[in-house]
Image (cartoon, rainbow, N blue to C red):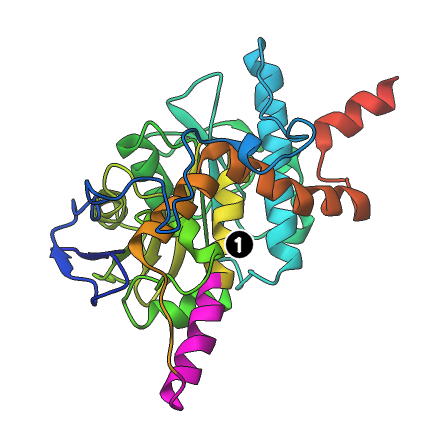
Amino acid sequence: MSHTETSTGPGTAPAAATGANATGSEIPADIKPASTKGYTVTTQGAHNISMGNANPHQIPKFDDPYKEREWILEHMAGVFRVFGRRGFTEGSAGHISVRDPVDPHTFWINPLGIHFSLLKASDMVRVDEEGNLVGGNTSAPINAAGFAIHSSLHKARPDINAACHTHSKYGKAYSAFGKPLEMINQDVCTLYNNHCVYTDFGGVAIEKEEGEAIAKAAGESNRCIILQNHGLLTAGRTVDEAGYLYTLMETSCEVQLAADAAAASGKEKRLIGDAEAAYTAFMNGDPETLYMEFQNDLALEKHYDDSFMSFTKNQTAKV
């Protein structure tokens, strides 16, 4: 039986929730998106943070699903480039998947054995729910563990279009404790009531049952999972959202480990209260805002080397 712990308020240690379908604690009914200082916000979206003019990074809408596919694959490759620059690689481990907008019962995943920093949109492989390679770079193999995890997640959560998993350093280190992150700073509050811990490590996740257990542990709403003794897994409506949540999770694990080390030497940690954490999560944790947050890193990758944008580059070459 799989075992999960969920992120809870800062006043007490998180209670264990047995059973892979543990969905995480609900925000208490008396906690609204308002802080104890009386700050309130009534709607979610990047407009809350964009002042003077509209948010410059809107999620585009497409009339043509084939054009949407190309856009998604370029952003998927861009997330890999960001991960590569940040050092999230570990051999052949790590994978990102995106649901195909043309055939939503299939998804795209990276080929096995190509460094994150070298991946291009045209390298990706489309796979169906049975593991058949049905489109894209079908001459390349894919990661069996990646298929087991991502196929199960896409089946279980129709609200999720993308998922990211790597064996990044601080995620692996913090996963050894099998505990949710504490609300110790403003940034990690984005993950309030939105992450859980899968504590039943079963070895390399190539078995279908292991992938299904991980997907079940995510419940109906969590977009971030700490896989005990393994690493991190994030998901979102866009690959940009999932990518930003991953970088946020990794940094939050690093900060948590530093804070824990300081606390072990006698320094007192001051945790953020439920009301402020819920308010901050409501303000910062919606798909539009999380999409916007990733665009700075993506723009930097385009500036240094935009070769990952295979379709755009090909169209430009034809002009």
Part of the protein shown in magenta: 252-267
**Quadrant placement of the N terminus:** bottom left
Task: Say above or below: 261 vs 179.
Answer: below
x, y (%) of residue 54? 66, 26
* Depth check, front residue: 284 or 305: 284
Let me know if residue 309 is in the magenta part. Answer: no
Which residue is the extreme one toward the top? 63
- Residue at 37% x, 52% y: name it: 276
The secondary structure that dominates the magenta segment is helix
Helix, strand or loop at mark 1? helix
x, y (%) of residue 31? 26, 44
- Residue at 77% x, 40% y: name it: 306
Find disc 1 in the rendering and name its residue: 247
- Residue at 36% x, 42% y: name it: 34
Q: Is residue 138 visible?
A: no
x, y (%) of residue 56? 68, 30
Which residue type carries mark 1?
Answer: Thr
